[in-house]
Image (cartoon, helix red, strand yellow):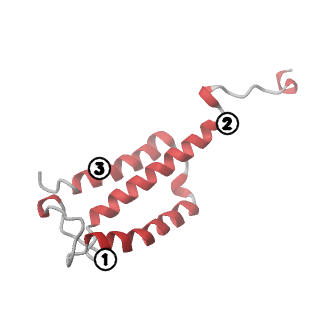
Amino acid sequence: MPWGYTVPAVAAVLAVVAAEVLLLRTGLFRRPAYWVTMAIVVAFQVPVDGWLTKLSAPIVRYSPAGITGWRFPWDIPVEDFLFGYALVTAVLLLWERGKSRKDFPMGIVKSRSRRDRR
């Protein structure tokens, strides 16, 4: 399949964004801390991924038919950034979702105080 790595990478990003916007609604995308986190992830991803995928001596090789061929910076396939974004964002969304449910295990809602029951 042409672009066999590109299509799933784009689909992963779309699925994660759709999950947040349509289902989870954690508000993660509105938080500056999320965007700082993503900048930190990219800051570490670039040197590591650049070393792994550099065209002069690649450790990881991609089929030319499976990717767009767009590489930036240091020969990193653009698809790696898409998958990285989807992976990290999915984990953070599930973390946020889990935090909100920790207060109410197994769907049990906290009971009201005696004063509120009157």
**Local secondary structure at mark 2:** loop
Residue in the picture at 28% in, 54% down: 9
> As rendered, which of 27 and 41 lies closer to the eye?
41
Q: Which residue is mark 1?
A: 73
**Quick one: label 2 or label 3, which is nearer the N terminus?**
3
Q: Which residue is mark 2?
A: 103
Q: Is residue 79 left or right of residue 22?
A: left
Question: Can you say whether 90 is above or below 65 in the image?
Answer: above
**Quick one: label 1 or label 3, which is nearer the N terminus?**
3
Which mark lies nearer to you, 2 or 3?
A: 2
Residue in the picture at 22% in, 57% down: 6
Q: Is residue 76 left or right of residue 102?
A: left
**Local secondary structure at mark 1:** loop
| Residue at the top extreme, as displayed | 118
Q: Is residue 77 left or right of residue 44?
A: left
Q: CA distance from mark 1 to mark 2?
A: 43 Å
* Amino acid type for the residue under numbered disc 2: Asp
Q: CA distance from mark 2 to mark 3?
A: 33 Å
Q: CA distance from mark 1 to mark 3?
A: 23 Å
Q: Which residue is mark 3?
A: 11
Q: Is residue 85 left or right of residue 80?
A: right
